[in-house]
Image (cartoon, grey):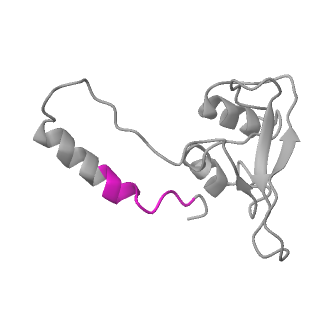
């Protein structure tokens, strides 16, 4: 199952675990095919929970299902490349002055999310 993007052929891209060999890690591309795709990570997660296949979803989407045992992580030492952005954006309506409350909230988000998500916690 995959998240459709602008590319012609759906594929997942990975870097193998560090320390496996002395040479630089080579990016590995795996073509993905199947009868189901969705542009929503929660839909892919729910389809995987229902047993429809393997899905590549962001950790925040899979955390609870991993903790409860509904999902099992595969290739946990491999790093996915280019699937999901490492940034989160706070989007607000344009104004020439950013309200203090918005600045404070963005600062709080930066601090609260600085360590990322730990799906294994």
Q: Is residue 88 above or below residue 35?
A: below
Whether residue 51 appears in magenta in the rendering, the answer is no
Q: Nearer the viewer, residue 8 or 23?
A: 23
Q: What stretch is highlighted in magenta?
A: 109-118
In screen coordinates, is 13 left or right of 35?
left
Q: Residue at x 55, y 61 (%)?
A: 118
Q: Which residue is drawn at 53% across and 49% down?
A: 86
Q: Is residue 61 above or below residue 120?
A: above
Q: Nearer the viewer, residue 26 or 47?
A: 26
Figure quadrant of the C terminus: bottom right
Q: Nearer the viewer, residue 21 or 113?
A: 21
Q: In which quadrant of the rendered view does residue 39 lie?
A: top right
Whether residue 115 appears in magenta in the rendering, the answer is yes
In screen coordinates, is 60 left or right of 25?
left
- Give percent across and percent down for residue 106: 27, 46
Figure quadrant of the N terminus: top right
In screen coordinates, is 41 left or right of 105?
right
- Give percent across and percent down for residue 96: 14, 28
In screen coordinates, is 61 left or right of 104?
right
Q: How many labels does the image show?
A: 0
Q: Is residue 120 above or below residue 61?
A: below
Q: Residue at x 61, y 45 (%)?
A: 58
- Give percent across and percent down for residue 15: 76, 57
- Give percent across and percent down for residue 49: 73, 39
Q: In which quadrant of the rendered view does residue 33 lie?
A: top right
């Amino acid at each position: 199952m995959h998240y459709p993007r602008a590319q012609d052929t759906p594929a997942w891209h990975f870097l193998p675990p560090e320390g496996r060999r002395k040479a630089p890690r080579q990016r590995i591309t795996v073509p993905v095919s199947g009868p189901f795709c969705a542009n929503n990570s929660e839909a892919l997660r729910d389809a995987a929970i229902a047993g429809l296949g393997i899905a590549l979803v962001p950790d925040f989407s899979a955390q609870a299902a991993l903790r409860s045992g509904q999902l099992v992580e595969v290739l946990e030492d491999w790093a996915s490349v280019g699937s999901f952005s490492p940034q989160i954006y706070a989007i607000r309506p344009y104004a020439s002055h950013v309200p203090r409350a918005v600045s404070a909230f963005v600062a709080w988000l930066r601090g609260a999310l600085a360590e990322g998500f730990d799906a294994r916690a």
